[in-house]
Image: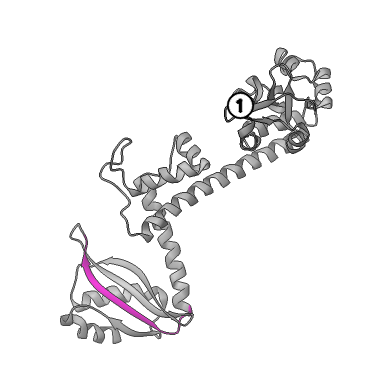
Amino acid sequence: MNVVDALLRTPFSQLPLEQKLEVQRLGPYQPKDCSLEQSHYGGKHRRTFCAETWYKKHEWLCYSEDKIALFCFYCLLFATTRDSRWCKFGFRDLKHLSQRARDHQSSMEHLDNAVKYRTIGNVNIAAQLDEGRAFSIRRHNQNVEKNRHVLGRLIDVLKFIGCHELSLRGHDERAGSSNRGVFLDMVEYTASLDTVLRDHLDAATVSKGTSKDIQNDLLDSMYKIYLQHLALEIENCQFLSIQSDETTDITCVSQLAVIFRFVKDGKPTERFHSFVPIVDRTACGISAVLKEVLQPYNAKSKLIAQTYDGAAVMSRLFVLQDQ
């Protein structure tokens, strides 16, 4: 009754409850004398299916003597059609069996069908609700783990680009463009090595996480975490030095680059803090900006040195800072 070929001819859903319970009692059809083989390298070598090992490793595996193929017992019973290899046509690729079996075992369809199989004939509503809740929690945790993995890969790409001081975006980021930018090209390369990221990019319909807005959000989040670590380093240091210099970006916006220097673990350490837009480039204006930057760190008693560019205002800055 649990033979794969019989279940293919008569769907499990059409069986009466007594027969369904008997199929459940018998479990997957797992004969030891399987004739499943696979030739490769021009027929010089053969792979054979080691039934005892694979049945022990994956209890849901079952074998069809008619099709000479492997099936998923749970998905076979509940007629899943999303991955027809395991419930309709059978799986014969022994070379990739290990990876494909792991992927299928962790899929939502398989887990859902496994829950259905375990609860056949179970009329305990409370138990069914508990199973459903547990399944929802597992599915939620798997989605969270997947999202964190994808987010981690995107952050790794941003960190790599930042370490090498490369620009993120290209001239034309549309699909098919020859100049999409370093970020998108790095994401595509990473996806070629990471199946989870590849699946996310191919299946995402709402947000792939590669838009310029998401890039900016990730950079802002990373910067906030960086400032938190910088605050701890400044809090633990004994003396602090500040360096600032006015610069103008490509859009002709005047900014003040602010850098902190201190000793950490007996070694001189330099940390970039920020680019601060400035309108008043006089001594008073620059001094006000630096005081605002230093205010959150309560570092007045630690500040022992200040370095600037521009001899015309430097002496005035020292006077204002002392005030």
Q: Is residue 237 magenta?
A: yes
**Residue 323 can be seen, yes or no:** no
Q: In this view, does 10 lie above or below 313?
A: above
Q: Look at the numbered disc 1 and give the secondary structure of its residue.
A: loop
**Position in image of residue 236 (x %, y %):** 48, 79
How packed mark 1 is, by other alpha carbons closer than 10 Å (few <14, some 14-19, many 20 or more), is few
Q: In which quarter of the image is residue 26?
A: top right
Return the residue nearer the eye: 204 or 127: 204
**Position in image of residue 258 (x %, y %):** 31, 72
Q: Which residues lie in the magenta part? A: 236-249
Image quadrant containing the C terminus: bottom left
Query: How many numbered badges does the structure rendering display?
Result: 1
Q: Quadrant of residue 296?
A: bottom left
Q: Which amino acid does label 1 sit on?
A: Gly
Q: Residue at x 30, y 41 (%)?
A: 173
Q: Main secondary structure of the magenta part?
A: strand
Q: Is residue 173 left or right of residue 135?
A: left
Q: Which residue is drawn at 69% across and 35% down?
A: 132
Return the residue nearer the eye: 252 or 56: 56
Image quadrant containing the N terminus: top right
